Image (tube, grey):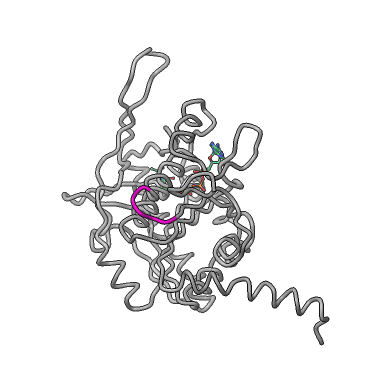
Amino acid sequence: MSLSRENALNIAQVLTESLPYIQRFTGKTIVVKFGGNAMTDAELHDSFARDIVLMKLVGMNPVVVHGGGPQIGSLLERLNIKTEFVNGMRVTDAKTMDVVEMVLGGSVNKEIVASINRNGGKAIGVTGKDGQFIRAKKMTIDRYSPELGAPEIIDIGHVGQVKSIDTEVLQVILGSNFIPVIAPIGVDAQGATYNINADLVAGKIAEVMQAEKLMLLTNVSGLLDREGNILTGLSTSQVDELIADGTIYGGMLPKIQCALDAVKGGVNSAHIIDGRVPHATMLEIFTDQGIGTLITNRPNR
Ligand SMILES: Nc1ncnc2c1ncn2[C@@H]1O[C@H](COP(=O)(O)OP(=O)(O)O)[C@@H](O)[C@H]1O
Ligand SMILES: CC(=O)N[C@@H](CCC(=O)OP(=O)(O)O)C(=O)O
């Protein structure tokens, strides 16, 4: 079948458009957090894996961090274990922690590894327990209680925040040309296991690896205002106002916080993008069609 002149030009246009991006990002580390709806749809799963393989093939160093909130939720439901979130964090008792580790370190991690490998990449799956590379400490939530009319500190169980990342494990994996696929489980000096929100892990890894980009794939088209418009190029103080007036809540809180922290810590840009769009990662990296919310140290661009 021969190609029409118009089609040929369209295809050539897309391919040449990608050239400056390939040149700019070759050799750079790009941390991609895979989560939300994109993870539960087989087709999107596959298109994500292909994007990661392509990035690797043209010389970038993709590092995948994944979530799995919906998958944890459905196993907890099957086991009749009730679950709740405070400020976007799952309250995690000992039983819940077992399920979280089983799902994140087991089924979800291996499914992503398998789909990257199936598409011609070489992925290795790890949790923060491997080589103890994600050191965690307990997280508590400090918030204002309208009922008490005073601040309160809430214990949310085995939920961690990232204390430090030992990059050696990642350097070994990247140095051997594999693609690391990381489950957000952390460990403390005593060997206790922590459930860490995947966005927080992705942000910290991007920071310690001094990544070029942090990409957070989610199940909305970006950070939205109350009318549903995508907000982009925001300053830290504008974000603070949106949190204070309730426009940003729940799962968007850790996402926006880690994006801000990452760019403050030296990551060039952070992007909150719509993982429901097939090839969202590729579109963001290789084309002029920036999608979603961009956060940089240079607001209002
Ligand atoms: N201002 C906002 N813009 C977009 N989404 C928001 C906002 N505030 C809260 N959210 C909520 O955050 C969710 C995304 O977080 P989360 O469900 O944890 O995603 P993921 O599983 O991808 O990490 C959205 O589906 C939405 O319900
Ligand atoms: C403490 C905490 O909330 N941990 C998350 C870890 C998984 C995650 O972050 O998954 P998503 O990115 O898909 O939401 C959880 O238990 O759901």
Please state if 177 lies on the left or on the right of 282 as rendered: left
Residue 208 drawn in magenta: no
Q: Residue 82, position in %: x, y?
A: 45, 36
Quarter-of-image position of residue 277:
bottom right
**Residue 228 vs residue 6, the one in the foreground:** 6
Count of marks overlaid on the render: 0
**Residue 150 vs residue 263, the one in the foreground:** 263
**x 54%, y 31%: residue:** 247
In magenta, the rendered stretch is 264-268
**x 43%, y 76%: residue:** 122
Quarter-of-image position of residue 146:
top left
> Mainly helix, strand or loop, the magenta region?
loop
Please state if 9 lies on the left or on the right of 290 as rendered: right
**x 48%, y 75%: residue:** 117
Q: Is 198 rendered above or below residue 107?
A: above
**Residue 123 vs residue 256, the one in the foreground:** 256
Please state if 48 lies on the left or on the right of 67 as rendered: right
The N terminus, quarter of image = bottom right
**Residue 299 vs residue 212, the one in the foreground:** 299
Please state if 171 lies on the left or on the right of 11 as rendered: left
Q: Is 152 rendered above or below residue 214?
A: above
